[in-house]
Structure formats: structure tokens, C-alpha cells
């Protein structure tokens, strides 16, 4: 006669059976509800796909550091090239180096027909203060709603755009820098321009 086993019928109880054993407190539920939108936002922003070389440049408008609307299509039409670069936050060390790199090479860039536009999620006042403090001769877009950031497919983490740059010619992306340099941004662009025909 077979001997009865002392093991339970299901030696690996499922999560569903054990879930009823753990009941979160009211405070824990509140914390989870508060954190859930934060994590959803964090991961949704990190999933954007940046535009590729050869793609059409986005025809989108933004608000400049002066509070005026700026249609990027108008900028594309005025110069042979447009550099749209993205940075996380105004007046932080890396973003300042990136902007100063472009400022210091601005004369050479404009001689080669490049219009420069910087974009971040900072507000109009922060962009104006950043531009004034470092004497940037180019436009900064205050993209709090992420209209331009999303149009270019630039990923954002915790609400900040990642550092990227796109060079546009004849309405098309001709160069994309998905890990844009800080103090070498202008040198990278000038190398690309030297190789363009």
C-alpha cells in the first residue's frame, strides 16, 4: 500500500495564492499611488526614437528666450544649414561648455552658412538668463511642453532632454549626434561641414 506524502498538493504555491497573505497598509498604498505616475513618466520619456540621417527635419515651432514664437521651417529656409542641438538644463556645467563651444566657433559656423538653435525644457526666463550670462549669439528655445524635443525624437529622462545634435540641410537631417559632446560640439559640427559636398 502506498504511503501518503507529507508534502502539500502544490509544492510551489502560485503568487496569486500568496498575494492575499500580504496586505499593504494605507500609507504604503498612498506612497505607491504617488510614485506610480513618476515611474510611468520616467520610462515613457526614455523610449523616444531620435530622427535618423536622411529623415525630413521636423516642421515645428517653439518659443524663444524672448517669448516669441519661432517656426523652424523659416530658419531652415534662411540658411544652407541649421544645427538644432538639445541640452538637459540651462546654466549647468556640461550645458554651459556645449553652448560656449558653439559660441566660440559661431563666426566660423555662420561663415559656413550654419544657423544655431539650442533647445531644452527650461522656461523662457531661464533660457534668457543663460543666453545673457554667456553671451550666446544664437537662439535658445524654451521647450517646456517638449514639442520640439518630441518632434526630433530626443529622449528625455526625468523631464530633461538628452544631449543630442542634428544638422539640417535642404529640409533633411544630414548628421545626427546622439551623444553630443560638451566642449567639442562645435569642432564635431565643423568636421562634418568639411566633409559635406
Image (spheres, rainbow, N blue to C red):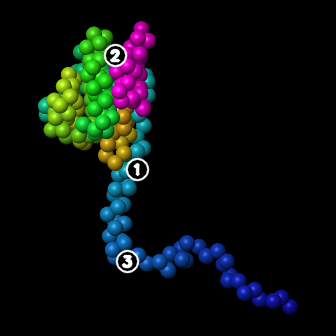
Q: Residues within 10 Å of mark 1 (few under 14, many from 20)?
A: few
Measured from the top left, where is residue 117 in percent x and y?
26, 26
Where, quadrant-wise, is the N terminus in this rendering? bottom right
Residue 176 position, x and y percent, is 41, 26
Q: Which mark is residue 142?
A: none
Magenta residues, as a range?
A: 168-197
Q: How many marks?
A: 3
> Label 2 crowding class (10 Å Cα cut-off): few <14, some 14-19, many 20+?
some
Mark 1, residue position: 43
In the picture of the structure, the residue carrying the numbered disc 3 is 25
Q: Is residue 79 above or below residue 142?
A: above
Q: Earlier in the sequence, mark 3 or mark 1?
A: 3
Say which quarter of the image contains residue 196.
top left
Q: Residue reaching furthest top?
A: 197
Residue drawn at (37%, 24%) of the image: 184
- Residue 127 in sight in this render: yes
Task: Give percent across and percent down for residue 6.
Answer: 72, 87
- For marks 1 and 2 on the same chain, the one whose residue lies earlier in the sequence: 1
Q: Quadrant of the C terminus?
A: top left
Q: Contact (CB < 8 A) between labels 3 and 1?
A: no
| Residue at horizontal 37 percent and vertical 77 percent from the top | 25
- From the image, tell me which residue sits under label 2: 170
**What element does badge 3 sit on?**
loop
Residue at disc 1, secondary structure:
helix
From this view, report whether residue 41 is shown above or below residue 17. Answer: above
Q: Earlier in the sequence, mark 3 or mark 2?
A: 3
SS class, disc 2 = loop
Q: Nearer the viewer, residue 134 or 9?
A: 134
Position of residue 89 measured from the top left corner of the image (x, y, whole percent): 28, 39
Amino acid at each position: 500500500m502506498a504511503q501518503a506524502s507529507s508534502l502539500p498538493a502544490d509544492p510551489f504555491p502560485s503568487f496569486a495564492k500568496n498575494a492575499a497573505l500580504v496586505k499593504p497598509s494605507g500609507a504604503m498604498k498612498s506612497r505607491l499611488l504617488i510614485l506610480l505616475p513618476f515611474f510611468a513618466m520616467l520610462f515613457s520619456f526614455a523610449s523616444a526614437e531620435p530622427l535618423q540621417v536622411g529623415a525630413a527635419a521636423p516642421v515645428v515651432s517653439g518659443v524663444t528666450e524672448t517669448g516669441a514664437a519661432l517656426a523652424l521651417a523659416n530658419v531652415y529656409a534662411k540658411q544652407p544649414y541649421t544645427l538644432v542641438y538639445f541640452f538637459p538644463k540651462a546654466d549647468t556645467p556640461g550645458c554651459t561648455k556645449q553652448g560656449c563651444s558653439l559660441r566660440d566657433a559661431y563666426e566660423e559656423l555662420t561663415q559656413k552658412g550654419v544657423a544655431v538653435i539650442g533647445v531644452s525644457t527650461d522656461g523662457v526666463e531661464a533660457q534668457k538668463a543663460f543666453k545673457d550670462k554667456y553671451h550666446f549669439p544664437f537662439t535658445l528655445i524654451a521647450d517646456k511642453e517638449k514639442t520640439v524635443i518630441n518632434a526630433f525624437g530626443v529622449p528625455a529622462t526625468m523631464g530633461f532632454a538628452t544631449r543630442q545634435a542634428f544638422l539640417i540641410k535642404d529640409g533633411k537631417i544630414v548628421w545626427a549626434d546622439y551623444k553630443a559632446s560638451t566642449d567639442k560640439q562645435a569642432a564635431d559640427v565643423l568636421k562634418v561641414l568639411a566633409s559635406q559636398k
